[in-house]
Image (tube, rainbow, N blue to C red):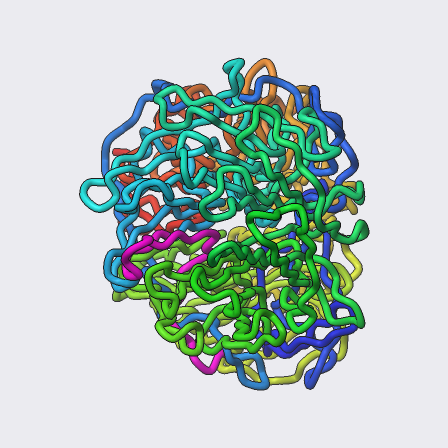
Amino acid sequence: MKSLSSIITNARVFRVGFFHTALCVSITVALLAAPTFTYAQNSHKPTAKHFKARVDESGPPQAEPGVQPSNEAIQPTSGPAISPFSITAAFLVTTPSWTALGPAPIPNGQTIPADANGISLTQAPVSGRLTAVAIDPADPNTAYVGAAQGGVYQTRDGGATWTPLMDNTAIAQTLAVGSLELDPTDATGNTLLVGSGESNFSADSYAGFGVYKLTNLKTSPVLSGPFNQSTTATDVFSKRSLSGLAIDPNHHDTVYVGSSTGQQGIGPQAFVGAPARGVFRSTNFFSGASTFTKLAVANLPAGFDFRVTSIVYEPGSSDHIFVGVADAAAQGIGGIYFTTNASAGTPVFTKVLATAIADFAPVKLAINKIGDTVTVVAATGETAPSNQGQGKAYKAVYKSSKPKNVNFTGLPSANGFAAGQGFYNLGVAIDPTNSNNIYVVGTLNGTFLFSRNGGGTFTPSNDTLHVDSHMVGVAPSNPSVIYTGNDGGVWRSNDMGLHWIDRNTATFSATQFQSVAVHPTDPNFSIGGTQDNGTNFFQPNRTWTRVDFGDGGYALIDQTATDTENVTMYHTYFNATNNLIGFGRVLKTSCAIEGQWSFKGAYTPPVDPTVHCDGTTDTFNGILLSDPVNFYAPVALGPVVTGGSGQTVYFGTNKLYRSINKGDLMTIVSQAFTSNVSAIGISKTNDDVRIVGLNSGKVFATITGGNPMTDVTQTGMPAKYLARAVIDPNDPNTAYVVYNGNGSTPTFKHIFKAANLNLTGTGTVTWTETDTGIPDVSVNAFVVDPADSTHLYAGTDRGVFNSTDGGSSWSLYGIGLPDAAVFDLAISSDGHLRAATHGRGFYEIVKAP
């Protein structure tokens, strides 16, 4: 499949090639939000690249207890606003150890620039999405970066080596990071606050549990937290993301925090019981018993629910603070707010910049102060005029002694820096010693922009970077040193952004896997799809290489392979109705190369006639381009059948499709469902035995291969995203389904088991909840040990759980697995359980005896 396209957003054309991807799923139940495409060169065929759709743009308003309506959630928000997995909870843990497999890094990433076919010309090392940065005040080689689900990393040598600081799973309930702030009153740079939860408004921007504190950074770092309690002992941060974090430069007990949207699960799902978002302040943070109070901001009362995306103090001032607010519901509240009495009992905020009501426009802020002159710069996700795309920049200059005259003016040279993803990829920084040096980061040609004249003009400097930038920081002690982070990881410049040094080194791991598939005989041979970093191959020699572009989704390996060359592999890209639906396939390992996978599905005709390395071409195989479909559409393998070649292949849209010839031709084998197919389970011994799960939580089955399939949903099963449907490989009458979401009553209701699937169509299939021992977190992955069907494994947002009694009881399995969400599981031929984490790469462990 070639990767040729341009994407048009607001009539501005951007070449994206292979590298411009991000998880494009709306938080609506259907998960159908799709970008708009136009095509260049190979004008009939879209690439597996696209613009991301934000998560809380299209859901209907929902009432949360005690707060204003929010258009974020797809579930009613009720129940206690507490962590779904308390750090004090006593869960049984079995103790084999997990081993990290990498990649650290992916050696041949999707980096700028690309050729005319969208293939990277640089292919620099990459890792995964970064969200925040803090640089030591006295040493430019000491820096801290926060990853989307990789935690906080520290470097003391300019990025040559990195050390993870949040891998203490007894304390860190999450590795999702939204903000970092070094204590400005600590001249030694030994204290760092971490705002947990990512708020980039993508479907895999995970929520957090509050503020964490790291002390003794230069010697033996100590992690504590989360800090999330109000003065009335209510948790005000769990299940939200903290994208705003600011410490009073004179009195560090005063800490301002801004909270925003965060998600859970591979689905994804909004949290039940999430507290109201907004601006919070602690005046006793370092006292040992920190508490937070929610504040009114201008015309937004303390009880109002709104998304804060940035907070900055004026350097040296305890009273001057700027707050960036995103307007997600066209309420007219988006913009920049300013107060001159932040230390007062009741600060008074004034709105000093209003963002466009029609736009969902996060606001990122940076500030410097030279003498009495203060310069504030802002990057917003607004739509720029004249069809320039999304992304606008602003600047305000005022006297600290006369702070009432704060007026922001536009910096039009930066217009469009965020392309079509103004809600997702944006960041801003300013040189602390020279207000002429301003940096704005976004995507495509705006991945990194610098100005040397106070924002009058901006110049791109993108070579070797990955697109989709989220953070940029300038070293206070040496402003020539800059760190920037994006969907591909971390880079450093020593010359104010003119040239870049890739800092995704062997000690840095942040790759966000979606899937894992294993070879039937070689225990090392595995493939997996990742968020914005392609599909990757863990080779028989235990090294990594990227084998295809884009957002890699589900991955499969045909289990009839008898060697490591003649191997049929599949993976999905993104899927978008009326643009691109289907999957990539390759028949030989040596042909698993970027651009050499044949596409099986549908895109805007005509079909590309290119003959690929394995002798095959793209095929319009019967999948309907008009079908509603999930961004990551599920694909599954069945057994070998008479007259077929290899295992049967199944694919889900709002219908179930089946192929007996490796996807060359697919036929519809179900009715059109009222919700999209989210999970497919096929018996390994009988191809007629099938179950599918839907976004809505419903389950359908057939034991005869019949169409229509029978609704076997049982009263009491959750109306939530059904993440996996699995049929016992040794017993076609036994099946499992697992769910995303939290807050079900009276029990958590994450795993259900049926032992009488044979009654489908003639009797009542009985589902029994079977998740005792698993906390109230999303379950994303599930596997049955083929050597012993009583041994089960569940991948969750909080690790891997194991049952050795057919699901009656569960315990947390193994030690040493970082607290990133586990999105997929597979058992290798040598008896290892392999886990695809969404933030720290692959891990493996010996399966239970």
Q: Main secondary structure of the magenta part?
A: loop
Residue located at (75% from left, 59% from top): 577
Taking the image as shown, residue 259 lies to the left or right of residue 31, namely left
Q: Looking at the image, which is closer to me, 231 or 693?
A: 231
The percent coordinates of residue 205 (x first, y second) are 55, 46
Residue drawn at x 54%, y 60% is: 428
The x, y position of residue 285, in whole percent, is 41, 27
Q: Let me know if residue 87 is in the magenta part.
A: no
**Is residue 124 in the magenta section?**
yes
Instruction: Residue lying at the far front in this picture: please name it.
Output: 401
**Residue 560 visible here:** no
Q: Which residues are magenta?
A: 120-144
Q: Out of 735 and 1, give the one closest to the viewer.
A: 1
Outermost residue on the left side: it is 219
Front residue of 438 and 504? 438
- Residue located at (64% from left, 70% from top): 414
**Along the line of sight, which residue is nearer the eye, 266 or 52?**
52
Residue 758 in the image: state x and y as whole percent.
60, 30
Q: Considering only vertical position in the picture, is 6 above or below 530?
A: below
